[in-house]
Image (cartoon, rainbow, N blue to C red):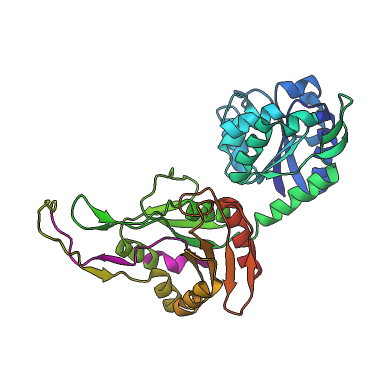
Amino acid sequence: MKRVVLGVSGSVAAYRAADLARDLMRAGCEVRVCLTDAAQNFVQPALFEALTGQPCLQDVFEEPVRGRMAHIDWARQADLILIAPATANTLAKLAHGDGEDMLTTLALAATGPIVVAPAMNPAMYTHPATQASMESLKARGVHFLEPVEGDVACGENGQGKLAANSQIVQETLLILHRAEKLKGQTVLITSGPTEEPIDDVRFLTNRSSGKMGMAVARAAKLMGAEVILISGPTSLPTPTDFRVIPVRTAEEMRSAALGEIRHAHLVIGVAAVADYRPAERVQGKIRRSEEEMVLKLVLNPDIIAELAQAHPEKKVVAFAAEPTSDPEVARAKMLRKGVHAIAMNDVSRPDIGFGADENELKLLFTDGKSAESGKQSKLGCALWLLEKLTEA
């Protein structure tokens, strides 16, 4: 039985949350409800406790089980958090990470999927601040069910009505199904740049931020996988909900990947591994002089090709960051490396290149098939990529 936390915020549409809770239960879910303070102006905890047979939380310090922090337990035990209806105020709090009530604190502690169904006055919904909150949340993987057009409680007409309960239930069940797609599988991901030391203070590297690799790792987690992320140096926060193996050089990344691949069902090489490294590392610091300096470079290992060729039984996928949109460049690389598929992105475009928050992937398979993600957040691209790989 899937466990859903239903968050209800202070919209007139809160009255529909009672039927929504029952519809989810009829679909086979266990439902726990959490109300904001504003929601209690429309509905009461006793109603949901009677309907669901579960405690209903309101205050951030409530502990249905004495000595247990409910906002942590409920967040970690939930298979999905559904916020319906969600007001503009709640969206703003979620987007800014404000944990001032039980619902927003639950969302901050959650590691699984979050689904949001807004409901508000049409002018409030289309306001740039509300749209900015939604875009920020979408970039973090929050799934939205857009409100529909019609008459709203204040008497105005426009896009602001809560989506139909049947649609909310259907989308919730689809996201719960997606969260099962990689259950029982381990996904190994290489990510970020490598740093190849010249001396003790200088190194060769590239412009990779590690954002795409981190997005693939988070997407795999959202789809139920056990995740192992081997990451070169980045400024990204280290997640706590899956294993991260920090490395610096290509040789360190290769060693870590060869040691972990036996656990993996799916291997995705997102890392921008330096093709070359200095032939010799100088101890200490190379001092400035008037003489010309020649830096001799040697070839680094092709990690993803080595993994694919050493483990043909594994599904190994490569990335190709190319300064072109010509897929033939990536296709040749895919065949040369011997991988199952390759995801190409055009890094000559500043809107989807190194360090950007969005991407656009073209996925190529060895059988000649291909697919395009369209431009979306890197997490959106990562979820799209994993969906395609599970279908292949």
Quadrant of res 33: top right
Query: In this orientation, does residue 315 appear?
Result: no
Residue 359 x, y percent position in the rendering: 56, 55
Of residue 221 and residue 376, the one placed in the foreground of this image is: 376
248, above or below 48, in the image: below
Residue 131 x, y percent position in the rendering: 68, 36
Residue 145 shown left or right of residue 252 in the figure: right
Residue 155 x, y percent position in the rendering: 89, 25
User: What residue is shown at x 63% (from left), y 27% (from top)?
Assistant: 102
User: What residue is shown at x 82% (from left), y 26% (from top)?
Assistant: 12
Q: How many labels does the image show?
A: 0
Residue 279 x, y percent position in the rendering: 20, 67
Magenta residues span 259-283
> Is 279 within the magenta?
yes
Q: Which residue lies furthest to the top in this view?
A: 41
User: What residue is shown at x 44% (from left), y 69% (from top)?
Assistant: 262
Quadrant of res 276: bottom left
Quadrant of res 152: top right
Residue 300 shown left or right of residue 132 in the figure: left
Of residue 168 and residue 124, the one placed in the foreground of this image is: 124
Residue 283 shown left or right of residue 309 in the figure: left
